[in-house]
Every structure is written in C-alpha cells, then in structure tokens.
Amino acid sequence: MTLKNSLCAWSLGVSIVLCAGASQAQTVPASLVDKMQKNGCSGCHAVDKKLVGPSFKEVAHRYKNDKASEAKLVAKIKAGGSGNWGAIPMPPQSIKDEEAKALVTLLLQLP
C-alpha cells in the first residue's frame, strides 16, 4: 500500500468516526439540553450517562411503554422521591407544570 493510499484510508476512517459521533449528537434535541440546564437537571442528570441520578436515556427506556409515564414523571419531578433509581433521593423541584411537561415530552422521545 502506498503512502497516498494509507493516508486516504486513514482519512476515510476518521471521517466515518466523526460522522458517527455527529449523528449520535443529533439524536439529542438541543431544546432538551437547554431545558436541562435552565432547570438545574444537569447537576444530577446527564442525557446518556448516570451521574447522581439516572441518565435521561435510562428514564426514557424505563418508561417508554408506559402510557401514563408523562404524568408520572411530571409528578415525580415536582414532588421528588427516592427508591426508584437507588438510595439517593431527588428533591422536589420548583418548576412550572408546563415546563416539566415540556421537559418530560422531550425526554421520552430519546432513543
């Protein structure tokens, strides 16, 4: 293999990795990230990894087949609670109902 072919193969590999990363980032709506930051969710939750609390993707996966999930999650955000994801409690959040519902709607759309 020539140097030129090696560089082309390497460049193609880098391009594939970069495109894969970009397509993964596009699956998370920017509006969800904005709402997480605006409402302080990102202090304990991340979209795709566990921090203090579960990731938003874990929550979406757990509740994806539950028809009452939106109302349950909005209530959980507002009231707080513990025991569903471990021993660390989630404190009640001071958030308007409409904002909590918008956040949950976006969260439940995660793959």
Image (cartoon, rainbow, N blue to C red):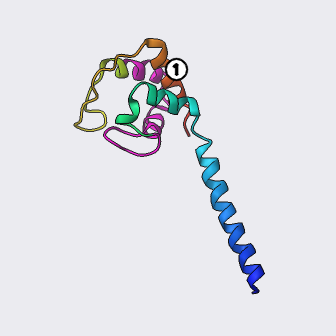
Q: Residue furthest left?
A: 87
> Foreground: 111 or 31?
31
Disc 1 residue type?
Ala
Q: Is residue 102 above or below residue 2?
A: above
Image coordinates of residue 77 in percent, x first then y, are 37, 22
Quick one: quadrant of the C terminus? top right
Res 100 quadrant in image? top left
Dot 1: within a 10 Å radius of its alpha carbon, few (fewer than 14), some, or many (20 or more) residues?
some
Q: Quadrant of residue 56?
A: top left
The residue carrying mark 1 is 102
Q: Determine the residue positioned at 37% across, 44% down.
A: 50
- Left or right: residue 44 versus residue 5 is left
User: Which residue appears at 31% of the width and 40% of the height?
Assistant: 52
- Above or below — where is 20 with respect to 76? below
Task: Examine the structure image and report whether residue 74 is included in the region drawn in magenta.
Answer: yes
Residue at image position (63%, 55%) is: 20
Magenta-colored span? 47-75
Q: Residue 57: in sight, yes or no?
A: yes
